[in-house]
Image (cartoon, rainbow, N blue to C red):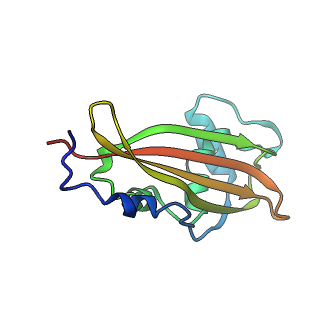
Amino acid sequence: MADRRNVPPREQIEALAGHRFAGGEYTVAHWENFLLTECTGATLMPDGMVHPIVLFHLPIVGAGTSITDMFALGQAESDLSIMIESYDWEFLAPLREEQAYRVEGSIQSSERCHTDSDDIYDRIQFRFEIFSADRSPVARSIITWHYTRGML
């Protein structure tokens, strides 16, 4: 059973739903795309297309936040207390090098959950939207993490 003395109140976690990040812009430089592509063992894509792996960090940084901030919002007990449920990426148009993209982000949902053995975790889902300069949607990233809570 989880140690309920250190668990943030359910109301605090559920109140996170709807939280909006500051938002901002992000431009993937050629060198960044080269390194991301190289680390996957792939070759550069044609016409300055950016490797999809960029959606691990572009949405977070572009929306004006950080992984550290996201941990703090959910009151993570430690860096090791986060379990990844999913990263869901949707590309509506190609991302390209050297183009500025507008990024907006929010917490889509936040809920207190219990396992079959009555351990507690909080499931927080982040949603990031990436837009071109003309405000056309380009990509979407939905990240779902479990904030595990301490054990007795």
The one nearer the camera, 57 or 77, is 77
Please state which of residues 68 and 124 is positioned toward the viewer in this rendering: 124
Q: Is residue 70 left or right of residue 134?
A: left
The image shows residue 120 at horizontal and vertical percentages of 30, 43
Q: Residue at x 39, y 57 (%)?
A: 74
Residue 62, above or below 81: below
Q: Residue at x 53, y 66 (%)?
A: 19
Residue extending farthest top: 41
Nearest the camera: 105 or 111? 111
Task: State the image coordinates of residue 62 (x, y, percent, origin top left).
Answer: 61, 61
Whether 50 is drawn above or below 24: the answer is above
Q: Residue at x 47, y 62 (%)?
A: 16
Give the image quarter of residue 103. bottom right
Left or right of 11 on screen, residue 133: right
Is residue 109 found left or right of 28 in the rendered image?
Answer: left
Is 95 positioned to the left or the right of 14 in the image?
right
Residue extending furthest bottom?
22
Percent from the top left, x then y, of residue 152? Answer: 14, 42
Locate residue 71: give its quadrant: bottom left
| Corner quadrant of residue 40 | top right
- Look at the picture and state if 145 lies above or below 59: above
Relative height, residue 101 to residue 97 (above, below): below
**Image point (61%, 39%), residue name:** 88
Question: How many numbered circles are shown?
Answer: 0
Q: Which quadrant would the N terminus be assigned to in this image?
A: top left
Question: In the orientation shown, which residue stands out farthest toward the left?
Answer: 152
Q: Where in the figure is residue 18, as x and y percent of width and height?
A: 56, 63
